[in-house]
């Protein structure tokens, strides 16, 4: 049974870990029999959340740790990505399409928009100076039809 | 990630193999800017061999679009798979970086 199954990992917020994290989360979700498209949606959303941790939550001088937790419930995966970085002062604005605090670094400002597009639910909780937690849900239904 | 180019007159086709994300984008940026600097009139990103791309790829392409504009050259993408097409459509990037065959 997948119900109640979960895994949690702590990993350094480095760009070299992005591929490992999104692939690991996707591999864990395979137990819920997703389609390839659904699995790719998860990979993209996770990659966006992790990029936010690496680029925005922490800085080059002040790197930190990311906690990733995936819980399975029925046909749904709940993915929590947490950092202890700088936090977001205005979450609503940060989630607007094309909004970025770093346009000089060629940021598209599409991260949260892609998370919202590819997942069934995205919740962001943040506290300045304490960190940010992104919780995303995806229900795998296509193979069930 | 691997990156290489094929040059045919004024057209440079840049091939990327592997993932385009925050980790690989700096190398792709630097490579593409060198190609643009070499004076290609049309620069085409072939994405046939790209396994994964997130919004970092959008930012990277928009940056190259700006650099192409400064150099009076044009930027295109080709062989865009369904997964990347989804991201391109949401971001509206086709308005400035058209898809060619």
Image (cartoon, grey):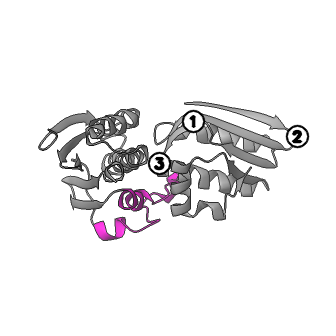
Q: Mark 2 belongs to which subunit?
A: B
Of residue B71 and residue B28, the one placed in the foreground of this image is B28
Q: Position of residue B46 (x, y in %)?
A: 67, 42
Q: Which residue position is annotated with label 1?
A: B27
Give the residue at mark 2: B9
B53 up-or-down from B2: above or below: below
Look at mark 3 in the image and give the residue it sits on.
Answer: B54
State the extent of the magenta-drawn residues as a range.
A91-118
Of helix, strand and loop, which one carries label 1? Answer: helix
Q: Position of residue A106 (x, y in %)?
A: 53, 53
Q: Quadrant of residue B14?
A: top right
Q: How many numbered marks does the figure carry?
A: 3
Q: State the residue in front, A8 or B34.
A: A8
Disc 1 and disc 3: Cα gap in Å?
16 Å
How much space separates mark 3 and mark 2, taking CA atoms?
31 Å
* CB under 8 Å between discs 1 and 3: no
Asked whether residue B9 is drawn in magenta, I would say no
Question: Can the viewer see residue A90?
Answer: no
Residue neighbourhood size for the residue with mark 1, other residues' Cα within 10 Å, grouped as few (<14), some (14–19), many (≥20): some
B14 is higher (above) or lower (below) than A82: above
Q: Secondary structure at mark 2?
A: loop
């Amino acid at each position: 049974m997948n119900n109640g199954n979960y895994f949690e990992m702590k990993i350094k917020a480095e760009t070299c870990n992005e591929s490992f994290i999104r692939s690991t989360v996707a591999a864990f979700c395979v137990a819920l029999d997703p389609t390839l498209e659904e699995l790719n949606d998860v990979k993209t959303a996770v990659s966006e959340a992790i990029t936010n941790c690496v680029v925005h939550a922490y800085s080059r001088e002040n790197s930190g740790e990311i906690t990733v937790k995936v819980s399975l419930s029925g046909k749904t995966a709940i993915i929590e990505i947490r950092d202890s970085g700088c936090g977001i002062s205005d979450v609503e604005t940060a989630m607007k399409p094309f909004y970025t605090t770093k346009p000089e670094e060629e940021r598209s400002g599409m991260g949260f928009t892609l998370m919202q597009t590819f997942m069934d639910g995205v919740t962001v909780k943040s506290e300045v100076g304490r960190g940010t937690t992104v919780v995303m849900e995806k229900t795998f239904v296509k193979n069930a039809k | 990630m691997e990156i290489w180019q094929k040059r045919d007159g004024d057209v440079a086709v840049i091939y990327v193999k592997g993932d385009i994300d925050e980790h690989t984008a700096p190398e792709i940026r630097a490579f593409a800017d060198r190609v643009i600097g070499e004076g290609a009139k049309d620069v085409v990103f072939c994405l046939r061999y790209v396994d994964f791309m997130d919004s970092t790829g959008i930012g990277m392409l928009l940056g190259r679009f700006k650099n192409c504009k400064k150099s009076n050259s044009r930027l295109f993408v080709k062989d865009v798979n369904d997964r990347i097409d989804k991201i391109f459509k949401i971001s509206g990037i086709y308005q400035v970086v058209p898809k060619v065959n």
